[in-house]
Amino acid sequence: MEARKMKALIYEAYGTPEVMQITEVDVPKPKDHEVLIEVHAASVNSWDWDLLRGKPYITRIGGFRTPRFPILGADVAGVVIATGSAATRFQPGDEVFGDLSGCSWGGFAEYVCAHEKALTLKPGKTNFEQAAAIPQAAVLALQGLRNNGNLQHGHKVLLNGAGGGVGTFALQYAKLFGAEVTAVDDASKLEMLRILGADHVLDYRQEDFTARGRQYDLILDVVGTRSVFKIKRALKKGGTYVMIGGTMPRLVQTLLAAPVIRRLERKRMTILVHKPNHEDQQVWKELVEAGHVAPVIDRLYGLDDAAEAIRYFGEGKFKGKIVVRIKS
């Protein structure tokens, strides 16, 4: 019997979005602990942009010359249509969402297989596009603030790069805990950040938050643009800096300097290692269902325009999340 076909956004060489094309490929078959999902929506993350370009080179592990995962897309939302022989958490017809980066990729396609542990039932009162915007960015925000940052009521929190996916979720979560939040980003995003609840907003082009003489209990850094030695000036004694994104030199600098800064100045400088999991997705499911937080979606694209969605991400002008609608 001839294999079923599906449309997918494929890339077979590293480069810019021009190397990507919509192609017909075989529908995958779920392994023992996997489920097959009919994808309704997927969202774009920084890993998609990095993997597409193969930069930094650490992203080429497992595929130095050609991409290991020819179909990008980690965040998905859709409907389970088949299950592997050992999969027990879901049944056909269940509406799910999840982050596939811990086990596979392939979200920019009509169908994808995912390990059942990567998935959570879709939040009620949300559509598939909203659900697809949640998994990776929201979990990174949660792990950065709760796990690494030990967020407490009354903390003074600074979010550097607050206008993207991680930042907009982190802002809402921090405000739920009664934190005083300073949000840093491009001027075009500041009004949105005020609406989301930021107590103070800064245009990074006009003001360096490390040179203002103000200090914070917790700094969550999505973009990693400042030297760790400048960052520590803006951190209180006993405070924590959590680096989520940034260039490889900045990551290495933070890793090497952290023990010395902690010993001499009692300031924690940490790098978040993302751990996608069902339990943290469940936290966000409940928060969204309760109306405490909501995903911010900048633009919606169709699958045929998914390469353009990734291009737009690379421009850095987006607010919140960029979502690709796979099934109309």
Image (tube, helix red, strand yellow):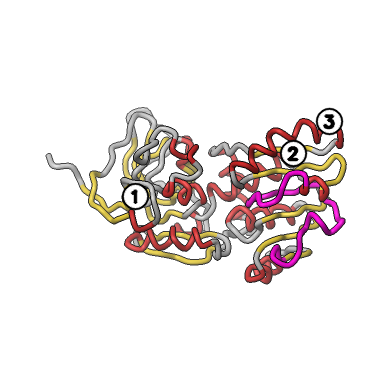
Q: Residue at x 76, y 60 (%)?
A: 208
Q: Earlier in the sequence, mark 2 or mark 1?
A: 1
Residue 262 is situated, as x and y percent measured from the top left of the image, at: 81, 34
Q: Earlier in the sequence, mark 3 or mark 1?
A: 1
Residue 296 picture quarter:
bottom right
The boundaries of the magenta stretch are 203-229
Question: Outermost residue toward the left?
Answer: 1
Q: Is residue 118 magenta?
A: no
Kindly identify which residue carries mark 1.
Answer: 38
Residue 51 picture quarter:
top left
Bin the neighbour count of mark 2 within 10 Å (Cα to Cα): few under 14, some 14-19, many 20 and up: many
Residue 87 is situated, as x and y percent measured from the top left of the image, at: 39, 32
Bin the neighbour count of mark 1 within 10 Å (Cα to Cα): few under 14, some 14-19, many 20 and up: many
Residue 42 is situated, as x and y percent measured from the top left of the image, at: 43, 54
Question: Outermost residue toward the front?
Answer: 249
The kind of residue on which mark 1 rests is: Glu
* In the image, residue 71 above or below residue 199: above
Marks 3 and 2 in Cβ contact (< 8 Å):
no
Q: Nearer the viewer, mark 2 or mark 1?
A: 2
The kind of residue on which mark 2 rests is: Met
Q: Judging from the image, what secondary structure is the residue with disc 1 in? A: strand
Residue 212 is situated, as x and y percent measured from the top left of the image, at: 84, 59
Tell me how far mark 3 sits from mark 2, CA to CA.
11 Å
The kind of residue on which mark 3 rests is: Arg
Kindly identify which residue carries mark 3.
Answer: 263
Quadrant assignment for the C terminus: bottom left
Bin the neighbour count of mark 3 within 10 Å (Cα to Cα): few under 14, some 14-19, many 20 and up: few
Kindly identify which residue carries mark 2.
Answer: 269
Q: Nearer the viewer, residue 280 or 143?
A: 143
Q: Residue at x 76, y 31 (%)?
A: 259
